[in-house]
C-alpha cells in the first residue's frame, strides 16, 4: 500500500491577475496557466491595479497570494508549488527570475537580492508571492501598475524576510511600459 501520510495536501492559492486596457487580451492565457498548476486549489481574481486593495477582503487566511499580470504564464506546471515551498523560516514574500518572450525570442529577466540600501539602483517589475497575512497587512498603492511588485517588496522588507529565488518561474510577454508617472507615486524623482 502507498504511504498516504507522505502525500501532500493541495496548497490553497489565491492568484490575483492584474490587467488594464493595454493587456486585457492575455487573461485567458494566464488563467489556463494557473489551472495547469499541479497540486493547487486555485482561486483566481482578475482586477485592475487600482482594485487590488479591495480584493484583500476575498482572500482567506489559509491561502498564499501570487500576483501576476495578464499574459504571464508559469514556467512549468510545478512553478507555483516550488515558489510556495520556499515560504518557510519566516519568509513571507518571494520573487523570482522570469523569461521575457518576444516573437519567439527569449530573454532572461534576472533579478537581484533586494535591499533597502540599493532600492534606488533599479526598479523591479515582477510577480510576487506572499502569505495572506502579509498581503492583508500591506497598504497597496492604488496609483501603481508596473511598479506594484517593487512597492510590495519594499514594504514587505520592513515587516518580514523577503526571498529571491534565482530560478525561472514565469514567462512574461514583452511589454511597452511607462513608469514615469508611477515613480512620483513612490517618492522617486528622476
Image (cartoon, rainbow, N blue to C red):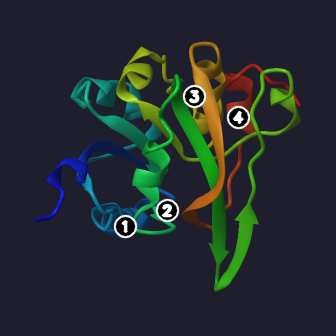
The CA distance from mark 4 to mark 3 is 17 Å
Disc number for residue 148:
none
Frontmost of labels 4 and 1 is: 1
Camera sees residue 126: yes
Q: Nearer the viewer, mark 4 or mark 3?
A: 3
* Circle 2 residue: 72
**Is 67 on the left or on the right of 27, as rendered?**
right
Front: mark 2 or 1: 1
- Does residue 159 lie above or below 33 as drawn? above
Q: Secondary structure at mark 4?
A: helix
- Locate residue 185, reporting x and y percent: 67, 24
Q: Residues within 10 Å of mark 1 (few under 14, many from 20)?
A: some
Mark 3 residue element? helix
Q: Residue at x 60, y 23 (%)?
A: 161
| Residue on which the image places disc 3 | 152
Q: For residue 27, what is the image quadrant?
A: bottom left
Q: Earlier in the sequence, mark 1 or mark 3?
A: 1
To which residue does mark 4 refer? 181
| Mark 2 to mark 4 CA distance (whole Å) | 23 Å
125 or 163, nearer to the observer: 163
Q: Quadrant of the N terminus?
A: bottom left
Q: Residue 121: give x, y in percent of width and height.
A: 88, 35
Disc 4 to disc 1: CB gap under 8 Å: no
Read off the residue under disc 1: 33
| Disc 2 and disc 1 in contact, CB within 8 angstroms | yes
Mark 2 and mark 4 lie on one chain; the one further toward the N terminus is: 2
Amino acid at each position: 500500500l502507498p504511504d498516504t501520510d507522505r502525500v501532500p495536501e493541495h496548497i490553497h492559492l489565491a492568484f490575483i491577475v492584474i490587467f488594464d486596457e493595454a493587456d486585457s487580451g492575455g487573461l485567458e492565457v494566464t488563467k489556463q496557466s494557473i489551472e495547469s498548476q499541479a497540486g493547487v486549489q486555485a482561486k483566481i481574481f482578475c482586477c485592475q491595479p487600482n482594485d487590488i486593495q479591495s480584493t484583500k477582503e476575498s482572500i482567506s487566511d489559509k491561502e498564499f497570494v501570487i500576483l501576476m499580470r495578464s499574459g504571464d504564464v508559469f514556467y512549468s506546471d510545478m512553478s507555483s508549488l516550488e515558489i510556495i515551498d520556499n515560504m518557510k523560516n519566516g519568509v513571507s514574500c518571494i520573487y523570482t527570475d522570469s523569461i521575457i518572450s518576444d516573437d519567439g525570442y527569449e530573454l532572461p529577466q534576472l533579478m537581484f537580492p533586494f535591499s533597502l540600501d540599493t532600492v534606488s539602483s533599479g526598479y523591479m517589475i515582477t510577480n510576487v508571492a506572499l502569505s495572506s497575512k502579509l498581503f492583508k497587512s500591506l497598504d497597496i498603492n492604488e496609483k501603481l501598475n508596473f511598479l506594484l511588485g517593487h512597492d510590495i517588496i519594499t514594504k514587505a522588507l520592513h515587516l518580514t524576510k523577503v526571498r529571491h529565488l534565482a530560478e525561472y518561474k514565469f514567462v512574461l510577454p514583452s511589454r511597452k511600459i511607462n513608469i514615469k508617472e508611477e515613480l512620483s507615486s513612490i517618492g522617486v524623482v528622476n
